[in-house]
Amino acid sequence: MRSSTAARTSVLLTSVVLVAGCGSSVTADSSAPPSGTPGEGVTIDNCGREILVAEPPTAAVGLSPGPTELLLRLGLADLLVGQAQTQSAPLPDDVAELASDVPVLGQAAPPAREDLLAVEPDFVFSPTTYEFTAEQGFASLEQLDEAGVTAYVATGGCAERRMEGTVEDVLVDIENLGEIFGVREEAAALVERGRADLDEVDERIREAERPTVAQVYVEGRTLSAIGAGIEYDMIHRAGGDNVFSPDDEAFSNFFAAQITPEVLAAENPDALVFKVSGPEQEEATASYLTSTFPEMTAVREGRLIAINSADTMPGTLGNIEVVRAIAEALHPEAFSS
């Protein structure tokens, strides 16, 4: 890839269009003992649901690599009893070994309800609400609640949040996990590193001119654009000026929309950011863009920036990594030293 985050493969476009967004907050349960004492509980407002976690979980499942990575980086490897959707992206090299013995409950898709409940989890962390779709054979939020399992959806992962999601939503998830599992210091350190990474990008591009950018997804000959949500915020944080926005009618109800080549050509962006699932899709997408838009500024000047789809999913540190990757491609001079 001309510009991408660390080796991660991708999720399918179905993940792109099915994913939704949510807001989450955490407060101490007023009926629980003081902080730090046995039996402490926390109450979380997660995607419109109020969740009471009376005790730190002891059997957790990450329903995709992003959430699994967060649990590992918080030092919770010994509590993991399952991981899922492992084909969507590899875990980063520095934590992959920690999960080598964690059972894989589903490689290409979320686990079936029976498979998930078979490992007897008491906490399940999902990037979106799709992983809880009963019609797909997955355990629903209601079924997990009946089984005594706490289900947590990434802050950017349900419908109420998807249009307004931001890169910093993952930091909210980290803080919430720190409260839930009683690892506040580890969470605070991870949040601090994430904010420092974003602050460094902000500082490097502070005086840079903002090129116009369109973020697109190509499947065959079908062209879609991103105009809202976390992906929109990524472009902004990376020092780009999105040519599509939530103010556009096409994106008034959903963060992505199918567009015609003529619509994109009329915008003539300085750079194109596109999601891919690996080298083959990157090559195919780049070929489509260069052949379809030979006179576009982004194509003529070689500003085609590939990013891994998995890094745009809610609840993953890849959100922050993508910001830097795009910023480096848009403003190479700002990162030359």
Image (tube, grey):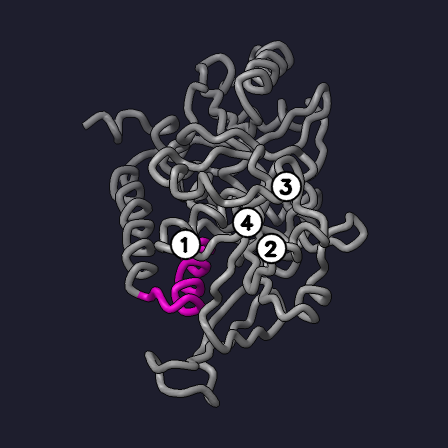
If you read the primary sequence from the N terminus, does the residue marked by circle 2 or circle 4 appear first? Answer: 4
Q: Position of residue 238 (x, y in %)?
A: 39, 38
Residue 106 marker: 3
Residue contact at pointers 2 and 3, CB within 8 angstroms: no
Secondary structure at badge 3 equals strand
Which picture quadrant has residue 207?
Answer: top left
Residue mark closest to the camera, 1 vs 3: 1
Magenta stretch contains residue 179: yes
Disc on res. 82: 4
- In front: 135, or 264? 135
Q: Is residue 277 left or right of residue 258?
A: left
Q: Quadrant of residue 18?
A: top right
Q: Residues within 10 Å of mark 4 (few under 14, many from 20)?
A: many
User: What residue is shown with label 1?
Assistant: 78
The label shown at residue 119 is 2
Instruction: Of the two numbered discs 1 and 3 on the same chain, state the one appearing first in sequence.
Output: 1
Q: What residue type is labelled 2?
A: Val
Quadrant location, the N terminus: top left
Q: What residue type is labelled 1?
A: Asp
Magenta-drawn segment: 169-184
Q: Please tell me whether mark 2 or mark 3 is closer to you in this view.
A: 2
Q: Is residue 151 visible?
A: yes
Q: Earlier in the sequence, mark 2 or mark 3?
A: 3
Taking the spot 72% from the left edge, 60% from the top edge, the residue there is: 140
Amino acid of disc 3:
Gly
Cβ atoms under marks 4 and 1 closer than 8 Å: no
Residue 185 sits above or below residue 252 on the image: below
Q: Which residue is at 72% across, 26% downward?
A: 260
